[in-house]
Amino acid sequence: MLKATNIRKKFGKLEVLKGVDLEVNKGDVIAIIGPSGSGKSTFLRCVNLLESVDGGCLEIDGEYLFREQGGRIIFPEPDKKRALRKRLGMVFQDFNLFPHLSVMQNLTLAPLQEQNADRDAIEHSCRELLRKVGLSEKEKSYPCELSGGQQQRVAIARALALKPEILCFDEPTSALDPELTGEVLAVMKQLASEHMTMVVVTHEMGFAGEVANEVVFMDGGVVVERGTPSQVLRNPSQQRTRDFMSKLLTV
């Protein structure tokens, strides 16, 4: 479904991504792990066009969302770019809910702008999503009235409201305490059981080991190692991966 090739990104003189490749098939759950500053979140933001890209290409079902040509990045026609971009959803580390809008307003805002459906149909769909994430009773609440775990579950429902084919998560539990982390991971596990295609930047090794079908270890702006969870988490072949995992196990 998604193929990223040789993605490169600099911030000034700092080369954050040095040529990252990733292939995602329908129904995959890909966990991207690695130390802070390794380029994981930047890669995810580049894939979602939330950061400009300095090099490489990205395909969705064989169609280019962007590609490198003659030393510069080119995009398809605006309508095509918009249609391809809508096939990707994003859940952020810090929720990014609109504080002045209720839960239901947060969920319906983008679909009302993007979808050819009436308000009643969109609100019905969003209520189903709130039920899915266990928050049916919170549709009239505001973000400040919710716990961090509840806000993140609303953020997941909001991303799903646009009906993406691939859902990306950028460290979705890093701002949460262990109990609230469990609430969010339970929703993500449910999505995985429903064969939602997901790319997850995470520090939750238990989730990566239990749910992902591929784990990608990044460091220094490159992919150091990739493989099944048992290979990468329990028997890594690269010394850098072994060093990283050994520090996790000693905490």
Image (spheres, grey):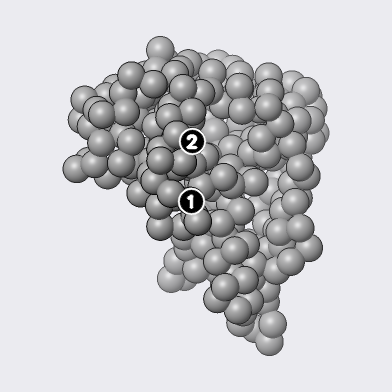
Q: Quick check: marks 2 and 1 in contact, CB under 8 Å?
A: yes
Residue situated in front as seen by the camera: 53 or 92: 92
Q: Nearer the viewer, mark 2 or mark 1?
A: 1
Would residue 94 be seen by someone viewing this image from the given angle? no
x then y, percent, for residue 176: 37, 24
| Extreme-top residue of the structure | 179
Q: What residue sits right under mark 1 in the picture?
A: 117
159 displayed left or right of 84: left
Circle 2 Cα neighbour tier, 10 Å, few/some/many (<14 / 14–19 / ≥20) = some
x then y, percent, for residue 141: 24, 28
Where 165 falls versus 212 (above or below)? below
Quadrant of the rendered image containing residue 243: top right
What residue appears at the point 63 percent right and 45 percent down from the top-left corner? 166
108 displayed left or right of 27: left
Q: Which kind of residue does numbered mark 2 sit on?
A: Ser
Where 247 falls versus 116 (above or below)? above
Residue situated in front as seen by the camera: 12 or 131: 131
x then y, percent, for residue 80: 62, 71
Q: What residue sits right under mark 2 in the picture?
A: 125
- Along the polypeptide, which appears first: circle 2 or circle 1? 1
61 displayed left or right of 130: right
What residue appears at the point 19 percent right and 43 percent down from the top-left corner? 100
The kind of secondary structure element at disc 1 is loop
Q: CA distance from mark 2 to mark 1?
A: 11 Å
Q: Which kind of residue does numbered mark 1 sit on?
A: Ala
Would residue 194 be seen by someone viewing this image from the given angle? yes
